[in-house]
Image (tube, coloured by chain):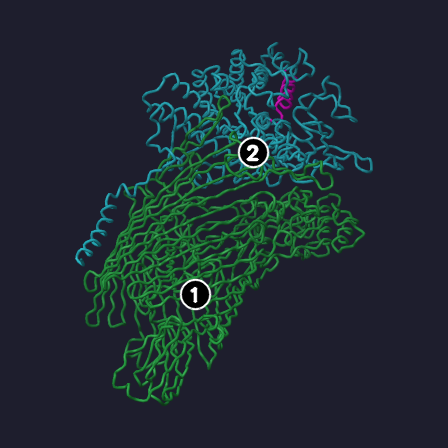
Chain colours: A cyan, B green
Amino acid sequence: MKRNLRLTLVLGLGLSVALAGCDDAFLTKVPPDQLSNASFWKQEKDAVLAVNAMYPMLNGWNYLYFDAASDNAWAQKSFSDWYPIGNGTVDASNGVVNNIWYDSYRAIRRVNEFLAHVDEIKEMDENLRARLKGEALFHRAYHYNMLANLYGDVPLVLTPIDIEDAKQATRTPRSQVIDQVLKDLDDAAAVLPVTYDAADYGRVTKGAALALKARAALWDGRYDVAAQAAKAVMDLSVYSLEPNYRDLFTYAGEGSPEIIYADQRLKDQRSQSAFSTFGPHSMQGGSDVTPLRSLVDAYETVDGSPVDPDNPYANRDPRMYATLLYPGAVFDGEVYNSLPDSPTADRVKADFNTTATGYQFIKYVDPADRANPSNSGIDLIVMRYAEVLLTYAEAKIELNQIDQSVYDAINAVRGRAGITLITPGKSQTELRDIVRHERRVEFADEGLRLFDIRRWKTAEDVMPGQSYGISYVDENGQEQKIPADNRIFDPARDYLWPIPLKELDLNPGLGQNPGYQ
Amino acid sequence: MAAGGLVLPASLQAQATGQVTGTVTSTTGTPLSGAAVRVQGTGRGAVTGQDGKYVITGVPTGAHTLQASLLGYTEATQPITVGSGQAVTADFQLAAKALQLEGLVAVGYGTQQRKDLTGAVAAVNTEELDKRPVANATEALQGMAPGLTVIDRGGRPGDAGTMFFIRGRGTLNSTSPLVLIDGVEGDLNAIDANDIASISVLKDAASAAIYGSRAANGVILVTTKRGKPTGDIQISYNGYYGIQGVETFPTPLGPRDYLELIDEAYVNAGLEPRYSQEYIDNTVKAVNGDPSVDPLKYPWTDWLDVVFNPAPIQNHTLSFRGGSDLATFSLSLNYMNQQGLIAQTAADRYSLRLNSDFHPTKKLDTGLDVALRRTSNIEPQNMGGVLWNMFHDAPPTTMAKYPDGTYGWGSTGNNPLAYAEAWGRNTTKYLHGRVDAKADYQLLDGLTIRTLGSVQAGDYGYRSWRNQADFHDYWNPDIIDKRISQNRLDDRKSNDSELYLRGLLEYKHAFGDHSLTAMAGYEQTDHHWEEIRAIRQGFYNNDLQEINVGDASQEDTWGTSNDWALRSGFGRLNYEYAGKYLFEANARYDGSSRFAKGHRYGFFPSLSAGWRISQEPFFKNHIGFIDDLKLRGSWGEMGNQDISVNGNQLYYPYWSLVSLGHDYVFGGQLVNGAAIDGLANRDISWESTTMSDLGLDAVMLNGRLSFTGDIYRKDTNNILQDLPIPGIIGLDAPVQNALSIRNTGWEATAGWSDLVGGFNYSVNLNLAHNTNEVTDLAGTGPYISGWWLTQEGYPLGTIYGYKTCGLFQSQAEVDAHATQAPQTGPGDICYVDQNNDNVVNNLDRVPLGSDMPALTYGSTWTAGWKGFDASVFFQGAWGVHYYIQGALVEGPFWENYTTTAWLDRWTPDNPNGRMPKPTLRLTIDHQVSDWWVYDVSYVKVKNAQFGYTLPHSVARPLHASNLRLYVSGQNLLTWTKSPNAVLDPEAPSGRGNVYPPVRTVSVGVSASF
């Protein structure tokens, strides 16, 4: 009995060691809810999934903030990372400067990883493989265009790299980066379809690749390339201007033939929160970015007559009413009142979520989202046909190839807006001013202004100094202007953002942009 | 009841004899069983039973000296005179010795005589633990062992909020020591303090390295109470009932001061005053109850008063212990209920523990232990809002609640009371069970095999329910001030299970002056966790709170799981020569599932030695007042496999994972996307800690004075950290073995206890000093995260910000200084331009000190006289720096909670104000700077207690062998250098939006029957 017991115990102990003996099995734990690299790149659907994951990186939301770095708008919250970008005090640790850099390269990694592995998949529809490569190249081009225009020379990474490669990386001159962008887009346009089946609506098309090419070339001053690419988009004959400008930025404009590429949103599942972020505080909005007076003043009157000083908001370019609220504007049946004596929650500067300029952006702020202001399904436009038309016009003007097609392009945009058309016989200089002005009012609150004033080198004229919001009449009958941001702009520095500090710490060889050292 | 008599020689029976009876208790009145009572010089004696009683028969008549002794207690004697046939009564009160030399101390996989220890082990006096009414064992440990830092962050029900670490923070990963309850990993917060028999804190490598892979942060061994073969069953009850309140809170400004300050801020911002003088006057009148103003129109709310209310806490433990030589058991039942200071906040716990031992043969010991507990707690669904809005964005001019129950929403649309009461609630339920089965068998003389199998499983349920609600305006009910548009349920179920197996062989052999102990063992742990989670919105109403009732079109589900496993072999060798020279060696070989094959195993050795100088003849014969003196030293290595990034444990860090969570929308439908998010590192392996320790233990003056001191150095290398990698790689940084941190420090404990006449008292003081330094960041860094700096040469927890140069007194001063933010003017803080580039920006930030205390200390004072006992426990820290932000420094800027500190603010007439010029919504004065770093060194009366043990004449009719009543207070008093600047010196740095520190006053009773 005693012997048996002893035996049992020894056996028990031995058994537990033996059970554990198959070491690999016991100590090898496989992630249960994620694929690992070893099991990926085997099936056709892996390629599709990998390309799908590039799309959320193309963030249309950023476009609602870029104007805050221009004379159109103010990121009025002093704790916002856009605030120092707007007023010329941005530094290399700024959150936005970091995030856009990191997110862009994160997206580029996905493309490079895909391109490095997609040919490992053996059984796959070759047309699909080609199309997916085209989609991937579009995404890489998109991000490099963004990087080059924000940071200047940037490392051009075209393969999946490891830590040592990255620490040795150097910056590629901007023009070479743009060369690559244009090449990727040519390759993409060659294989991408003009349209998709309904189930794939939202993927990048041939038109998107050409429109992005036009944008990249225009921003880089390659006007002939820009004009040709824009013309190629026009010749596709699938895009047209949405009859009602305001509709573009509401549910009514979803799927509009004007939209060339939009960041696809879906209520509850991939929603955006433009209403609660930018809308009036009286409707639970947060006024993150608010229009500046300079933008309001830029809108013409419908008939070209001077603005009535006693009734300044009357009779203006309808695009102003579609873009912003001003004291007396009616939104969702309520009168917006931001005057300093307003009894409403919109009283200017009443709260940090209240407008600090007295104006309010309303693109993508649709009354239909008022009940659920953080859950909007309106797609965020990244490129639309009006931009292609004005890119075409501007490129032709800069090339001094001024013909009727230039007037037609500009007037298509003005005509849709509902203001007087321009008449023939303008000089190159006059037309340059006209198209620049047109871009400002047409794309206000859509993020293009920052890139425009950079490439025109007009930022040093329009950015510095005190900016303003609404005017009002004080108790002494004096007209007063609400002061907004007091900005500085150093032309030697502020045409580029700094390279993120963390990036330089890890690779000092990158070198910092001028003025940020 | 029972008293064991000694065997008596028959020849003595004939003499004239009497009888001596009595009770032996501790100075606190606890009956002491197993105490030996002897009539000196007669050979007569007895051992006390469970109730502390003894009976000695056959005592020769005449005058004698009666002596009582018990391990761990100071011997006591008293004269008696016994008459023939008489029964004499003699009771003893024994004082616990400050240091228990002879006692057994729990060490890794076994016990050792305290005198033989060569490692730094602090054993916590459980009698002290028993006396403090605390919700759990962690709180009770605070300040009781030097080198063990316990930071008490509030008494939030269900979440003790206590952080603890041993000998400083050694890693950026988890700093929590390994806690073993009866040898198996467990949760110290979950155990009823009444169930604990002893706690050992293993601080150095020599004592902890046997736990190898998980020992780098130190080890806490908890042993639960077991039955003793007393031949009877002792029933005891311990219970207390207490009231909790807010311990400390900064004093808010009164209405006039506050409203005028806000006006001043508005005027300073170039705006009209916010409140008219009439409004201010009326508010003051309303607060004073002046009937001429309507208080509803001039609301004034002290949120502190409204949101935090006193709440009860109670704890009851009933236990049954006893047994025979064949089997012993200990059964305890516990109920704890803690209500919170905030509405809808509470926690309770039911637990059961049955420890049983069976001894079927002389050589076989077996046991089966079962522990079950059910805990549940609730809190407001919007607890975050409650705590945030207590301080922020809910000005006191907000009406908390109108007489009809309508909530006010003030100018900001926030109301912490409404968030507490009306938003819904989160409910957490946890059921945990553990069964240990063990068998120890003596194979040969000196050779024992010990086996243990343990299964634990937990079932966790969490429900977060948010109400749908419309909050109407009091003045115009047609207006809805605030709306929660949809109700919502987040229902999560998770469970975890762990199987632990261990077997070890122990060998003991002594020959001549040599004594050898050897142990070798194997163990493995396999852990699994899984969770499923469902969310729906749009429920039929607020009462039907099950997923089925929600809107199926608005649902979300999640499910996941993880596993980890460890397997280890370990061994220990002890050698002792002549009771003077002690040597010990430990080794452990550990494998972890978290590392790839080839990097999986780590080897962790340690060595230690001790010299009992007091046993040397030259010492023994000459220095009489020192009872025991030991010098010890140790060196060893330990490991850490707990890798976390941003607080999330990584279970599969070496795998390159393709995540499916990158969803996008095509054709109006959500589709999956897949991408690699992180760069994989297959080469990661163990963090290792090398530690050296030199210690001295001394016991003097017949055990009345004791001293223990240690100095140590702890180097942690290969710390697992997601070192930043260049962003152009486009992936998250992998975890790498990279960093090094050094902790050095010393600890000292001194104790004195004595009995003078019937009065006994003791004083114990422990001190610990630790310095921490990041020694290597692998060529990277500094890392700046918020206001924290991690940089080579500086401690972890270094605050990083601007040095300040006072307040600007004039625009001329502003202009002459380096350029700061454009709005800077007189009354604003001047920041030092460190790099002299004439611009103040990020580059001018410097380290501003550490939030880790330079010195921590604890001191316990006890006294007992007759049935009375009293104790006070002080705890404190010196050289602690906190960075304060949020409402406490920017009250008027955002109409936040504003303290009386603002009475001393800059104005042209008060140029030396502590607070800068108040203005609106500007952050220029609220940059991280030394202006807002306060020295919060403090002393707290952590606990004070007064008890009375009823005399037997009273206890006996109640069938009690012992009955003690006490009153106790926890967190009674705080002295701090910056009383009104912080929420509490133990609260975390930052905005103060945490559950407030809690003071508890309670009454309790402990009785045995």
- Around disc 1, counting alpha carbons within 10 Å, would you say few (fewer than 14), some (14 to 19), or many (20 or more)? some
Give above or below for B469 relative to A221: below
Give the magenta-colored segment's residue range: A428-445
Give above or below for B107 relative to A376: below
Q: Position of residue B134 (x, y in %)?
A: 49, 60
Q: Position of residue B82 (x, y in %)?
A: 38, 87
Residue A441: in magenta span: yes
Tell which circle, 2 or 1, labels the residue nearer the N-terminal end: 1
User: Looking at numbered disc 1 in the image, what kind of residue is underneath it?
Assistant: Ser
Residue pushed farthest top? A404
Q: Who is closer to the viewer here, A322 or B952?
A: B952
Q: Is residue A103 visible?
A: yes
Residue B580: in magenta span: no
Q: Chain of mark 2?
A: B
Determine which of the numbered discs, if any, sits on residue B292 in the image: none
Q: Position of residue A337 (x, y in %)?
A: 73, 32
The secondary element bearing badge 1 is classed as strand
Q: Position of residue A26 (x, y in %)?
A: 28, 43
Q: Who is closer to the viewer here, B606 or B728?
A: B606
User: Looking at numbered disc 2 in the image, what kind of residue is underneath it?
Assistant: Gly
Q: Chain of mark 1?
A: B
Question: Which residue is found at the position 32% from the left and 42% from the top?
Answer: B683
Determine which residue is flagged by label 1. Answer: B236
Give above or below for A286 relative to A214: below
- Are dots 2 and 1 in contact, CB under 8 Å? no
Q: Residue B77 appears in which quarter of the rendering?
A: bottom left
Give above or below for B1003 relative to A144: below
Q: Is residue B849 visible?
A: no
Q: CA distance from mark 2 to mark 1?
A: 52 Å
Image check: B1004 left or right of B167? right
Determine which residue is flagged by label 2. Answer: B538
Q: Residue B33 appears in which quarter of the rendering?
A: bottom left
